[in-house]
Amino acid sequence: MATGTLSPTPPAAKTTVFELIPPRNGFGENTFVSSHGEALKPAERAFYNRERPTKERIRWGFNPDKDPRVGSLLRWVAAMSNGLAEIGLQRFLDTRERGALFANADYRVSVSPGAPPQPAFDWVTLSELQDTLDSTLQSSVTLYDPAFQVIVFVFLLSPSGNSMAVWRRKLNVPDAIRDANQDEILAVKAGLKTTYPVYVDE
């Protein structure tokens, strides 16, 4: 269904750029990339280390313009919002679970030789987010309507990898995409729980 293609990302392709350029002709020219978990591996301690309080591992409210990697990525997300929303809806339908797209601000990949680097987006389910014990990550995913919105989190790790700063964006699903998948959306939503617990460490 999705116009973009989720392509494998070789670990060796990791790089960092300071400005991302959306495709000249928009979403149709672009290939969306999943790192298949490679972009998330460096963040495992920040996500799940139970030896540190959640508020010390996962931090909110930082100015995204303080780091050009973050500001550039958030601008890219805004420019490509329709395509990302379509990808997020597809991941929801594929997994039949609530979740969100995550992008590591320090991870870039070229999808073909000579192509400009772009970010990778990985789908993380609610059950995986519950293990972080972060209330904002969990509540963001429990409260949104998957038929109308997709949640995107951008994160940047500290140099030690022990903590991360996180920024959230809510993307609207285009009406045409929702209408084209209405029956499947309703079927998947019918199988979701009506309420979800939010786990915290305090």
Image (cartoon, rainbow, N blue to C red):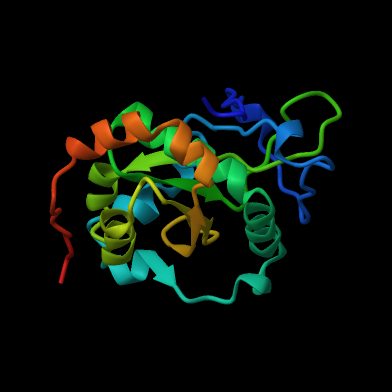
Where residue 33 sits, quadrant-wise, is top right
Residue at 62% x, 30% y is 4
* Left or right of 51, for residue 113: right
Note whether 12 is above or below 24 in the view shown. above
Residue at 23% x, 51% y is 130
Note whether 131 is above or below 114 in the view shown. below
Note whether 141 is above or below 28 in the view shown. below
Q: Position of residue 77 (x, y in %)?
A: 62, 53
Residue at 72% x, 64% y is 68
Residue at 23% x, 59% y is 133
Asked whether 37 or 185 is in front, the reply is 185
Where residue 49 sits, quadrant-wise, is bottom left
Q: Position of residue 192 (x, y in %)?
A: 18, 41
* Left or right of 28, for residue 188: left
Q: Quadrant of the C terminus?
A: bottom left
Q: Position of residue 169 (x, y in %)?
A: 50, 61
Asked whether 197 or 185 is in front, the reply is 185
Where residue 11 sits, quadrant-wise, is top right
User: What is the count of numbered marks?
Assistant: 0
Note whether 17 is above or below 65 in the view shown. above
* Left or right of 81, for residue 200: left
